[in-house]
Image: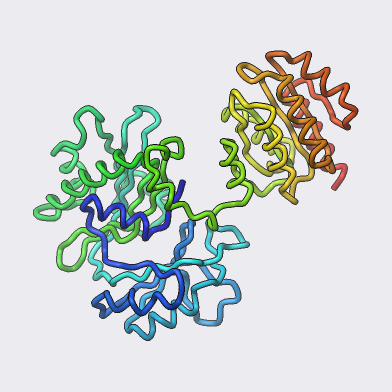
Amino acid sequence: MNIHEYQAKALLRRFGAPVPDGHAVLKAEDFEAAAGSLPGPVWVVKSQIHAGGRGKGRFVEAEAGELGGVRLAKSVAEAKGFVEQMLGRTLVTKQTGPSGKQVNRLYVEEGSAIEKEFYLSALVDRESGWVAFVASTEGGMDIEEVAHATPEKIHTLTIDPVTGVQPHHGRTLSKALGLSGDLAKQASDLIGKLYEAFTSLDMAMLEINPLIVTKDGKLRCLDAKVSFDSNALYRHPELAELRDLTEEDDKEIEASKHDLAYIALDGTIGCMVNGAGLAMATLDIIKLYGEEPANFLDVGGGASEEKVTAAFKIITADPNVQGILVNIFGGIMKCDVIARGVIAAVRAVGLQVPLVVRLEGTNVEEGKRIIAESGLNVLPADDLDDAAQKIVAAVKKGA
């Protein structure tokens, strides 16, 4: 689950991390109170959407000379004008896609006099299972670009969960960022607070870009991006309340209600698969044969007939879907359960596009028999390669 910048900063502030003062603006009337509580002489008005690249983004139908989704104001009147211009409009960034996202929330923050910019993030290292911090002197830039062009400028350190953050972690971070003296002490203090926030709240990712040094020698988290492990939200009901459904795809919201792992994509072939690895392989082979997947959907290892039916309905709700591939390897999941779920869903929503079903594993013969005797227009497949070729050919034939 993702949250907005202003929510992330509020959480970091709880753990003592240095963040600039600011206030959320959910409607234009909120601005006066927000701006009045900040000292100035500079105010920053930030669009709050779940996408990066806001500063370089452009609003739909922007007027000549208009700035992006993060703007610097030198007076309250100018900041108010920015609020009126930005709130409710659609912002397009490199991460939103061409359709962009509507800006329903803004964040008005005190300005910061920046001396240096750094990059700092925390995530779970898959290899060790420990929390890893990634730091770079190239703050304010896309870390992917830095990794590609100058990988030597990226430094990683992992934290043993038994010991937690130790003094040597602070020294390592300070050295990576070229900090000394009081700034090195601040960095050591900061990494401990960020680690506590990350582990206490079951974060999946914490990104500070940029982490800045102000002209008066203070470290500040100038931006903050946080996502949480959705599987751990039951331990944090107060965090679940931060979820902004307007930032999520309607199909992904519906999928979460049925405990389905669903991500909407831009292609034409809907996929229903069990197991994340098999799902990724299915997406890859569809691309190999010349089409694009419309979604990632993992129904899990123990899905019921009702869950499969819900998954099928979510796929068919996507108007871009021109064909559907069901690819199930039955272990815990039984092929006859999948077959009944597919049939129930097809009969409930109607089948307007080609459907290819590949079943293998537990009760596979029973599953194939159920589908064969259903009277539905379903193309059977013997293996994944056969299934991908059949659905791609069917979609191209109907195009």
- The image's colouring method is rainbow
Residue 293 lies in quadrant:
top right
Relative image position of residue 193 (x, y in whole percent): 22, 46
Residue at 79% in and 42% down: 349
Residue at 62% in and 27% down: 303
Number of labelled discs?
A: 0
Find the residue positioned furthest to the right: 375
Above or below, comparing residue 232 to residue 2 in the picture: above
Relative image position of residue 58 (x, y in whole percent): 53, 70
Residue at 66% in and 30% down: 273
State left or right for residue 80 relative to residue 218: right
Relative image position of residue 166 (x, y in whole percent): 16, 36
Above or below, comparing residue 388 to residue 335 in the picture: below
**Residue nearest the observer in this picture, 306 or 59:** 306
Relative image position of residue 307 (x, y in whole percent): 65, 32
Residue at 62% in and 51% down: 250
Residue 114 lies in quadrant:
bottom left
Above or below, comparing residue 157 to residue 115 in the picture: above
State left or right for residue 382 relative to residue 40: right
Above or below, comparing residue 342 to residue 214 in the picture: above
State left or right for residue 204 relative to residue 62: left
Find the residue positioned furthest to the bottom: 77
Residue 262 lies in quadrant:
top right
